[in-house]
Amino acid sequence: MVSPDLELPRLRELLPASGRMKTRIKLDERQSQLIATDFPRPWKTRHTISLNLSLWGQLTIPQRDMLFLRQVCWLTSVNLLKPDWYRGLVVLGALGTLLQLLQQDVVGVVAAGGLTAVAGTQVWRQVRGSRAEVTADETTLQVAQRRGYSETEAAQALLQAIEAGPRLEGRPSLTFTELLRCQHLRSLIGASPVPVPEQAYDG
C-alpha cells in the first residue's frame, strides 16, 4: 500500500509550474478509476485530481508519474474560452436559438439549435476527441523529459499504465481511444512500425 503522506507530496513535486496553482489532489477510495478529474469548467480556477490509492499503488512509480502528469497536461490544455470559429458558432447559435424562441419561430429554433449542436460537437472533439487525447500524451512525454525521464522510458511507462487500467478498474477491455493512444505510443518508441492513420482520429 502506498503511503499518502509520501505519495501526495511526491506528486505535487512532479507538477509543472503551469499546473501547480491550478491543481488539487485528493484521495477517493470509492471511485472505480485509478485517477479521475471533473471536466475543467472555465469559471473554476482550481481543478481536482482524485486518486484511488489502493489501485494506484499497484502501478510502478514511473507508471504513476506518467499517468499523473498526463492528467495534468490534459487539464491545463483545455481552454473552452479560446476564440475560434466553432466556439463563435456555438455562441451565435445559442443566441439565435434564444431569439427564435422569443419570436416563436419553430423552423428558426430548429435551424439555430442544429448549428449550436454541430459547433458544440466540434468543440467537444477538440478537447475530448482522440486527437486531443493523443496530443496530451505527447505533451506528457515532453514534460517527463524535464523530470529526468527519457522519451522512451516515459512512453513505455505511460503505455504500461494505460494497458493496466482495465485490469485494475474491472473493465473488460481498453476503449477505442485508449487503443489508439497505445498504438501511437508504440510507434513513438519503435515497438510498432505502423503509425496511427490520420483518418482514425475523431477530432
Image (cartoon, rainbow, N blue to C red):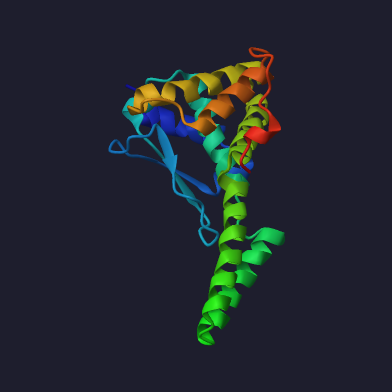
Residue at (36% x, 24% y) in the render: 168
Q: Is residue 38 above or below residue 72?
A: below
The image quadrant of residue 70 is top right
Q: Quadrant of the N terminus?
A: top left
The image quadrant of residue 69 is top right
Q: Quadrant of the C terminus?
A: top right
Looking at this rendering, what residue extends furthest in the front direction? 107
Q: Is residue 87 above or below residue 153?
A: below
Residue at (65% x, 36% y) in the render: 135
Q: Is residue 170 above or below residue 153?
A: below
Residue 202, visible in the rendered structure: yes
Q: In terms of depth relative to the viewer, which is nearer, 181 or 93? A: 93
Q: Position of residue 61 (x, y in %)?
A: 48, 20
Q: Position of residue 23 (x, y in %)?
A: 51, 46
Residue 2, visible in the rendered structure: no
In-image side of 91 versus 41 (left or right): right
Q: Position of residue 22 (x, y in %)?
A: 54, 49
Q: Position of residue 79 (x, y in %)?
A: 62, 53
